[in-house]
Amino acid sequence: MKPSPRERAILLAVEITGRHKEPDAPDPSESLEELAVLAESAGAEVLEKILQQRSSFDQATLLGSGKLEELKNLVQSMAVDVALVDHELGGSQQRNLEKALGCKVVDRTQLILDIFAHRARTREGQLQVELAQLNYLLPRLTGHGASMSRLGGGIGTRGPGETKLETDRRRIHHKIKKIQQDLTAVRGSRGVQRRLRQAVPLMTLALVGYTNAGKSTLFNRLTGAAVLTDARMFATLDPTVRQVQLPSRRRVLLSDTVGFIRQLPTPLVQAFRATLEEVTEASLLLHIVDASSPAASAHCSQVRRVLNEIGAENTPQVLVLNKMDALDSPQEERAALARRLSGESGGIPCVSMSARSGEGMDRLYALIDEILPADPIESALFRFPLDDLGAVHLLHEFARVTRQDYTEAFCEIAAEVPASVLRRVAAYRVG
């Protein structure tokens, strides 16, 4: 079967200059480059990037009339399929741009939602993406333009699909209500799983960071798992939890979560709030940063902003400067970079490493053991009735068993046990 041809795309952005420029606005050139990576992740072929400077956005079309005429000719001459705009568009703006350019127009929010729709694998992830897409489409039903009536595939058409949902507000409201009910049921199941995990005395670590910072590579390095690693943005969408044994012999749970991004659409932050509970309930956050990226500082700032939004700003953190092996700079400059990023992040502990090669892993393990709340290990002897082998399993799972003997009535075990586990089996201790 032949793969579908890649959509031919041009990228559009407006840089606001003068007194209307927002002081904390992202660098437009960097943002446009990031949009190009998003477009590639969505399967598009980027033909051209256009950045226009204006004193303010045009209320009708975002861009000026002269630039629109120039772009119309470009669309025709290059046979462009889709124009990707690095801003959030209103329904009328999208309709006017499609009419002026003669091609499909997709804004940044819709592009990210499209990628999420393509990458979601679990039932909860798929429901959350569909909910976010419908909430995004709802205020844009009136006069959405060509992309609303198009039944074909491509960027901006994945997920709920181009059906009559988009032309009937009541049906969309009904669909949203149904998805919310389904999500409640799915989240209830995941809540039960989380409570079962919490019943076992293990602390949780969560990997957070800007998308494509190397979280999944580090997750695989720490756990020996085979989670998808990909240079595309949002390669990991659904959270994955695995058990890790630290050098101190303590066991912890490690959670890999979706990568953050600047201008992360509000519907997605809201929809994925339940997924991000893995972050808010963690004992320690490993904040992964691509140290080789020129925008590393801005990426750190964006992650901190999202952590503040979800209420995880006070959770202990380790700043993990990943991909240090990709930096072609002297050791002194690397150390200066680490000090600067750590300082910008509030002076949190920092480790420089490479998840790909394993360089710096010893220091990371040591920092995790140092920062996690103490869970000292003690040698103990236990005698379990043969009808309570669940406690025996608990020791085998979360302690280091050094001897095990059976009699007619008991199972006797000597083990090195973390204090948190010892409290659960203290009734069976005999020495």
Image (tube, grey):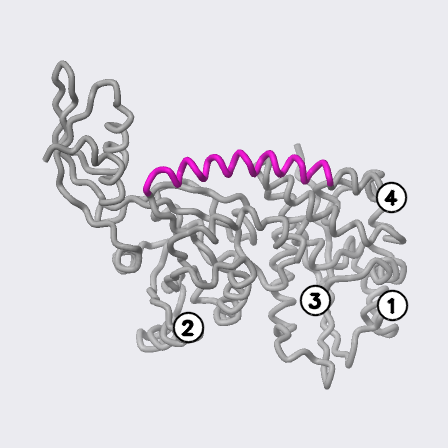
Q: Disc 4 versus disc 3: distance between alpha carbons?
A: 32 Å
> Is any part of residue 320 visible from this angle?
no
Residue carrying label 2:
346
Q: Which mark is in front, 4 or 3?
A: 4
Judge whether 39 appears above or below 245 on screen.
below
Q: Secondary structure at mark 1?
A: loop
Identify the residue at horizontal 47%, vertical 63% (top origin).
Answer: 313
At label 1, which amino acid type do we have?
Ala
Say which amino acid is labelled 3.
Answer: Lys
Q: Which residue is mark 1?
A: 60
Q: Using the image, tell me which numbered label, if any, was put on residue 167.
A: 4
Q: Residue at x 30, y 55 (%)?
A: 372
- Asked whether residue 348 appears in the rendered view, the answer is yes
Magenta includes 185?
A: yes
Residue at horizontal 34 percent and vertical 67 percent from the top: 349
User: Which of the two discs, 2 and 3, labels the residue nearer the N terminus?
Assistant: 3
Q: Position of residue 315 (x, y in %)?
A: 42, 60
- According to the picture, the residue beneath numbered tag 3 turns out to be 49
Which mark sits nearer the N-terminus, 2 or 1?
Answer: 1
Residue found at the very far bottom of the displayed protein: 19
**Mark 4 or mark 3: whose residue is earlier in sequence:** 3
Residue type, numbered disc 2: Gly
Amino acid type, callout 4: Thr
Q: Is residue 289 magenta-colored?
A: no
Horizontal side of residue 346 vs 85, given as left or right: left
